[in-house]
Image (tube, rainbow, N blue to C red):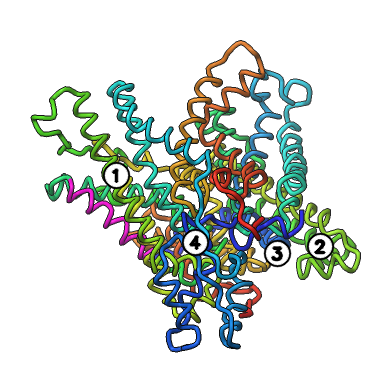
Amino acid sequence: MSDDDWPTPLPHPDDDEVSGADASVLSVFAPESETSAGPAVEAVEASSEHISAPPPTGSASESALAATVEPLVGATSPSGTARRRRAGPLTWIGAILLLAWLVAVPFMSTVTELRQNTQLVVMVLAVLGVNIATGYGGMISLGHGVFVALGAFGAAYAADDLSLPWIVSIVAGAVVAGVAGGVIGLPALRIKGIHLALVTLGLAIVFQPLSKRFPAFTGGVSGRAVGAELTPPDWFGTTRWAEGLYRYLVCLAIVALAMWLTYNIINSRPGRAMRALRDNDTAAAVYGVNLVTTRVTTFAVSASLAGLAGALGIILVPFTSQESFPFQESLVLYAMAVLGGLGSLWGSVLGVAIREVFSWLGELLGGVSGLGPISEFLSLLDEEHFVFGVILIALTFVFPRGLIGLFRPRRRGQD
Amino acid sequence: MDMVLLLQRVFDALFNSAIYSSLALALVIIFRSTGLLNFAQGEMATFSAYVAFVLLSGAAPGVTGGGLASWIGAPLIAPLAIAGAIIFGVAAGAATERVLIRPLRGAPELALVNVTIGILLALNSLMGQWWGTGPRVFPPIFPSGADDHFAIGGARLRFSTVGAWMILIVLLVLLALLLQRTRAGLAFRAVSIDPVSAELSGIRVGPTLMYGWALAAGLGAIAANISANSVLLEPTMMVRVLVYAFAAATLGGLDSPKGALIGGVIIGLSQTLIPAYVPFIGFELSVLPAMLAMVGVLIVRPAGLFGTQRIERV
């Protein structure tokens, strides 16, 4: 396999809906003082996220700029033409399936199933958190389960010990995780690539013993129950199903809001700064991206998304314990982000959806008995960690860009 | 300060030091040659220990009874089983390189992280599924009864510690001879320094790296088999050990075998001594100093104590 099979630094992420964004990412940060490049820069700033920048042509300094940018980011759009990504049929099918599932799920589930399905919706945020750090920020994180846990503990602490209203508690959980993420993001300023993967994996492994040491916050070995529960207003109904539906809607709304915010961050200046740093940090710094704030903010945002997922988990099951956050969970979160597709918002949704499909398949096939060694093998398919381990390996060989790549036509100059 | 107690703690720590040093050495061998941190090193080692366990007790999934005990005399079985497990580990390491790592040459770092993390997850879960997540009793390699120790200055230096170090030293001597005195070792050093130039001068890079993986996996298997008796055999046995080993390798310099050895000793000592004398840290946080050391070294001096300083070209 030659080098050409591999896109540059990471399996090249499909930046969401930003066709040709790769080409423009760095040019956006061209110094304003360079007057000849000025118009091109303004054109990029003014253009919507869907329109790619016309590569500057003309004066010597401009072509020098273009020469710097092009090799760094690979694909460039044909000169002067704006392209818009069309949604393929698969995208429509996916969108319709997702919508149909979201609408149908409360009516087709028992109370327990509805809670589990809501947990799935919430999980999207945790996977998205990994995706922001790894896919958009280029900082491999194998420890995002820690931030999910911190969000859960933070929300539980705020709701119980501080008796804050639930909405404040949820935000508090996300903030706790975000601050921790910012602090843990500090080493990421110096530690890059595989070494950062090592540090975050270490964090995930150390977290369990660490959290046992602070029982006031985490409930120690046995975990902590949360007294205050989120209950719907009277007009909504008082059955357990109505309660479940209410929580489902609340979680869905918060997840949608968080995704919308994330989408906007990704497709605005901070998002472009993130991707520029990922693709070439030296070049990005030269173009005026503040390395320190961008890296720390990226990690903080990604951690607070994971923390939000943890905090919402408290609403659904009013109990949390360090037992629920073994290091393998962090790795599964990472696997889902990779599986769906790094550098893609919808890839994270896809990752969670596929997890559900696999767990359903695993239950189905794992229950088959009476086939001797084949049953023995099939029962392994019910082991989520095993399945995700194998998927991670297989994916690297089969779909290096993640499954979201299936939904996207390959761009010229990639792969 | 109670000097006898201090000496005793140092002696106890030295056993762990030997384990961390050998695993760190395995990590360094792979990092030097491929620039890859093998996150699955610990699980691969644990799997080898389970192979020894199966050879001893016949407790393979789907197999009942049997084991070596049924057809070989009792005193011989433990060393034989462990030798078998190490051979298995070496073969599995070579196979991993051939099947999963070699096709990814030239791939971005992320692909290699994915593969090694995938192996970690899959093996960890597989072991839990096949042999249960509960701890298993593993036979001692060295005499480890209550009286099997040297008394030095009032403290006890256990035979198992001495044995672990003897094995480690023998391995180091063999490794040094292999690397410095054989053609394969020369090829391996050449590939570690510059794979492209090595390939151009006629060295077959792939097979050479495979030897490296085999060697590293063998070291890991030995470490796991030595420690399985004292920490009890379970699927997550090497997970925390891996953190210590990575800390040791980072501290010593990720591309320095000497650093791995010294880093292992330092981390092993700090794991026992720091919690003992700093009450806040206590037993549960004994992994914290190692973790902080790792992060600190990576931030302040990424090359570690003995590693090569890297200069980034802009």
Q: Which one is nearer the viewer's eye here, B275 or A170? A: A170
Q: Which label number is shown at residue A139?
A: 4
Among the two numbered marks 2 and 3 on one chain, the one whose residue lies closer to the N terminus: 3
Chain of the residue under label 2: B
The C terminus of chain A, quarter of image = bottom right
Callout 1–callout 4 Cβ contact below 8 Å? no
Q: Which one is nearer the viewer's eye here, A68 or B62? A: A68
**Which residue appears at 13% of the width and 49% of the height?**
A164
Q: Does label 4 lie on the same chain as label 2?
A: no
Q: Rounded to the nearest whole Å, what is the CA distance between mark 2 and mark 3?
A: 10 Å
Task: State the image quarter where residue A322 is shown.
Answer: top left
Magenta range: A167-184
- Frontmost of labels 2 and 1 is 2
Residue A178: in magenta span: yes
Residue A160: in magenta span: no
Q: Rounded to the nearest whole Å, what is the CA distance between mark 2 and mark 1?
A: 49 Å
Chain of the residue under label 4: A
Give the residue pinned by disc 3.
Answer: B32
Q: Which label number is shown at residue A220?
A: 1
Q: Rounded to the nearest whole Å, what is the CA distance between mark 1 and mark 3?
A: 41 Å
**Which residue appears at 19% of the width and 26% of the height?**
A242
Chain of the residue under label 1: A
Q: Which one is nearer the viewer's eye here, B8 or A156? A: A156
**Residue type indicated by callout 3:** Arg
Q: Does label 4 lie on the same chain as label 1?
A: yes
**Residue type indicated by callout 1:** Gly
Give the residue pinned by disc 2.
Answer: B188
Q: Which one is nearer the viewer's eye here, B96 or A279? A: A279
Q: Does label 1 lie on the same chain as label 2?
A: no
